[in-house]
Image: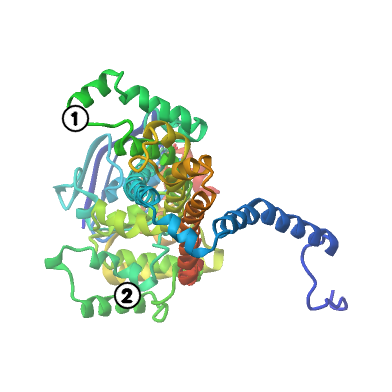
Amino acid sequence: MSDVVHPAHTPVTTEPRTVRLLVILLVLSLVAVLLLAPLAAVFTEALADGLPAALQALTQPDARSAIVLTLLVAAITVPLNAAVGIAAAWAIARFDFRGKAFVVTLIDLPFSVSPVVAGLALVLLFGSNSTVGGWLIAHDMRIVFALPGIILATLFVTFPFVARELIPVMLEQGRAEEEAALTLGASGWRAFRTVTLPNIRWALLYGVLLCNARAMGEFGAVAVVSGKIRGETTTMPIMVEMLYNEYLATAAFSLAAALALLALVTLALKSLLEWRHADVLAATRRH
Amino acid sequence: MNIDIEDLTKTFGAQTALHPVSLTIPSGALVALLGPSGSGKTTLLRILGGLEIPSAGRVRFDGQDATGLRVQDRRAGFVFQHYALFRHMTVFENIAYGLRARPRRSRPTRAEIDRRVHRLLDLIQLPDIGPRYPSQLSGGQRQRVALARALAIDPRMLLLDEPFGALDAKVRKELRQGLREIHDSTGLTTVFVTHDQDEAMELADVVVVMSMGRIEQVGPPAELRSRPTSRFVETFLAR
Ligand SMILES: Nc1ncnc2c1ncn2[C@@H]1O[C@H](COP(=O)(O)OP(=O)(O)O)[C@@H](O)[C@H]1O
Ligand SMILES: [Mg+2]
């Protein structure tokens, strides 16, 4: 062996250079065509009449109320889904109970049901033609064509995101660390706060970001339950569609660009956190 | 502390992990639970630690009924099979965990916690590893940190599940000696689980041989060798 001289940079992989280059090129061009180009197009279109015009479009009352509504819906649904998602993942990962497999399947339901169907189901359940809906309206509580309906629809659509991220992580980590905390005298709540939660924080953050992106971007389910009442129940995605249908290109694309920016901000936030905590991440990833 | 186990039974659904077992562990003893995989050793240890609730039977600590005692109130220093160190905390924070978890009125001051953690790090002969994370330690170091963390709560007994199971032969020998020394200097009643008969015979004062959820024989190593009471004990020790 000693007489074999290895050049300093021999790669471990054996694929020829050309193959590697081709694969990388293919991936990069796919990313460019599928992800970057549409994004660039939206921003170009939004700024077609210049930045002042785009900003002007965003300050119109309808656009403003859509932005506020979207942020409000996200602010309510994301924490709720995070809490319920943690509870669901914890129950599934830590306990054996009857019907567990069924619950796991149920969590995925929103992924397999079309959002429009979900929205219609809510209208059927809570609309004025249903018993529940009739009663609610008689008592002056509106669900369908109002904020509660939008929130319910968004909760339904975004339900799997947090739980789905957490279940495999919690299963992989097992109970031992939590049990160790208990034997050391920690209460259940303290063990959860100081051991369970820190161990799942990255998966949780990722789930929350995905949940947030979807909560702000959901169209189908919200379109059905909201009734698209302009300035009242129109979220950003719905407002974008309405403006576009009215041939108000600058307004539509400005709002679309704002929506895309919100998503980009969450992505940037995640990258920033990962970068800031890179050392702890590396140290705690696995024993 | 003296431990009395009376007719302890544990079932998991249709599976019986422990048929009624009875055992007395005298105060200060170093006891090995020895048996093949699946014989109920871990289950028995976890019941002692309060991590598993027995289906029937009783446990007494110093004569006092402890069957329903909460895990937090047992003060049992537990070393888990793969140590279960808190991976997002440094070694120092791991060892300090039990002290910081105490209710405010009995919680030591910062300086006192600092002093005690350093004393424990000295005891396990790793004085400088406080700032490291568990992922940066060798298997043997992790085991000793887990031991120090369990000792930090000033436990009434030590319970260890396969404490040497994940280590290579050389480190095993060293750490056996380490456990013996810590046992002798603290005088704690100590129960450890193993499937390795050499380990049990060399280290323990009393060996409890288990098989299929039953206790086959209890006695000092020499007695088990010279007078096995069943074919199982004889063949298991002869391996
Ligand atoms: N949480 C559990 N659920 C179901 N069965 C279990 C559980 N824990 C242990 N058992 C069963 O109880 C028996 C004894 O297990 P255990 O005490 O872990 O044995 P040992 O530690 O001697 O290998 C085994 O048959 C095991 O499958
Ligand atoms: Mg075991």
Question: Residue B148: x percent and y percent?
Answer: 34, 69
Question: Residue B230: x percent and y percent?
Answer: 44, 38
Question: Residue B169: x percent and y percent?
Answer: 55, 64
Q: Which numbered circle lies on residue B105?
A: none
- Front residue (pair B141, B195): B141
Q: Is residue A225 above or below residue A273?
A: above
At x 50% / y 35%, what residue is drawn? A111
Amino acid type of disc 2?
Answer: Leu
At x 39% / y 81%, what residue is drawn? B127
Q: Secondary structure at mark 1?
A: loop
Is A247 displayed left or right of A85 in the figure?
A: right
User: What is the quadrant of the N terminus of chain A in the image?
Assistant: bottom right
Q: Chain of mark 1?
A: A
Q: Which numbered circle lies on residue B120?
A: 2
Q: Secondary structure at mark 2?
A: helix
Is A64 displayed left or right of A27 in the figure?
A: left
State the colouring used for the structure image: rainbow
- Front residue (pair A227, B103): A227
- Front residue (pair A12, A272): A272
Q: Which residue is mark 1?
A: A140
In three-dimensional space, the C-alpha distance between marks 1 and 2, rounded to whole angstroms, equals 66 Å
Q: Is mark 2 within 8 Å of ligand 2?
A: no
Q: Residues within 10 Å of mark 1 (few under 14, many from 20)?
A: few
At x 63% / y 56%, what residue is drawn? A36
Amino acid type of disc 1?
Answer: Asp
Spot the residue most to the left.
B105
Question: Residue B43: x percent and y percent?
Answer: 36, 43
Whether residue B206 is visible: no
Whether residue A280 is visible: yes
For discs 1 and 2, the disc positioned in front in the rendered view: 1
Q: Residues within 10 Å of mark 2 (few under 14, many from 20)?
A: many
